[in-house]
Structures are given as C-alpha cells and as structure tokens.
Image (spheres, rainbow, N blue to C red):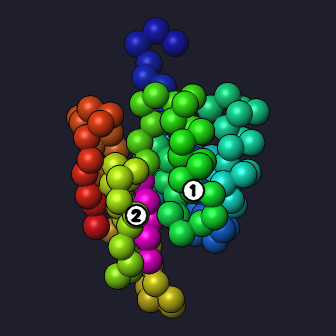
Amino acid sequence: MIGRKRSPVVLLVDSDLAFIWWLGELFSAAGCQPVPALDCEQALDISKRMKLDVAILLVNPAMDGVARMIELLNCRQANMRVAYVIETGAEAPAGQAWTVLERPTGWSPVSHWDWTRKIRRLLKQLEAAPAAAVATTG
C-alpha cells in the first residue's frame, strides 16, 4: 500500500446504539473506520483485542468510567484526540476534550447534512492541528 494513507479509526462510545450506528455510517462515508462500543469497558476491551490505533475517541462524557478509559487509551494511543458528544445546553468536563459536539435532542429532526459538515470539519482539524491543540465544534 505504498502512497495510500490509512483511514483514521474512530472509536464511538455511547449507550445509544442507534446514535453510534448512525454516526458510524457518517464517519464511514467520510473515509474513516468507525468502531462502536456501548460502554467504556467494552471500548477498552475492543481497543485492546483489536489493537486499534485510535485517531478519534468520540464519547459521551456523562458515561461511567470515561476519565479512566481516556487515561488508559492515552497510554496506548499517543496521538488520540478526544471528542465529547454532550447534551444540548450541558457543559463538557474541562481538560480532556479536543473538541465538543452537541448531540441531537429528543425527537427533534437530525440533519444529516449538518452532521456530515461537523464530521468533515473535525477531520480537517485532525489533519491540520497538532495533537495537543484544543478546538471546539458546535
């Protein structure tokens, strides 16, 4: 595979299976390799067993064990970026997120176009910014 760039691995962690499945499809269409997990323990297990090189960890920060999961993944993933998906109006915990996205709420319509735009912006930031940089995406 000389000259071919590897697709970034995106580890999606949220207890809402429909949401991470939908996000996975959007990331896949954007050229990424999405890997879903329903909780932090499952994410750690999958990451270890599959020897994932995670580029982006997209996680709901309200889940149990998020801080510990990020700490453990960071030990194995030096360049991993953490993106929080928070409820609209909620505040993301300080310190660990590279970027923050607001998830759709309730039964409000979800814009496929808007989320595709968010994901593309996120991927451009991944390519352009050093690993220590922090950005915010709405």
**Which numbered disc flags the more N-terminal residue, 2 or 1?**
1
User: On the picture, is 99 further left or further right than 12?
Assistant: left
Residue 49 visible in image: yes
What predominant SS class does the magenta segment belong to? strand
User: On the picture, is 79 further left or further right than 61?
Assistant: left
Is residue 61 within the magenta segment? no
- The three-letter code of the residue at mark 2 reads Pro
* Furthest residue in direction bottom, as rendered: 107
| Residue at 42 percent of width and 30 percent of height | 79
User: Pointer 1: residues within 10 angstroms few (<14), some, or many (20+)?
Assistant: some
- Kindly state the secondary structure of the residue where label 1 is placed: helix
In three-dimensional space, the C-alpha distance between marks 2 and 1, rounded to whole angstroms, equals 11 Å
Q: Which segment did they paint magenta?
A: 83-87
Say above or below: 95 vs 64.
Answer: above
On the image, the x and y values in percent for residue 115 come to 38, 65
Q: The C terminus appears in which quarter of the rendering?
A: bottom left
Instruction: State which quadrant residue 5 falls in.
Output: top left
- The three-letter code of the residue at mark 1 reads Val
Residue under label 2, please give it. Answer: 93
Q: Nearer the viewer, residue 38 or 1?
A: 38
Say above or below: 105 vs 93.
Answer: below
User: Pointer 2: residues within 10 angstroms few (<14), some, or many (20+)?
Assistant: few
| Residue at 24 percent of width and 36 percent of height | 129
Numbered circles on residues, count: 2
- Kindly state the secondary structure of the residue where label 2 is placed: loop
On the image, the x and y values in percent for residue 43 come to 67, 48
| Residue at 68 percent of width and 59 percent of height | 39
On the image, the x and y values in percent for residue 59 come to 52, 58
Say above or below: 118 vs 86.
Answer: above
On the image, the x and y values in percent for residue 130 come to 26, 32
Residue under label 1, please give it. Answer: 66
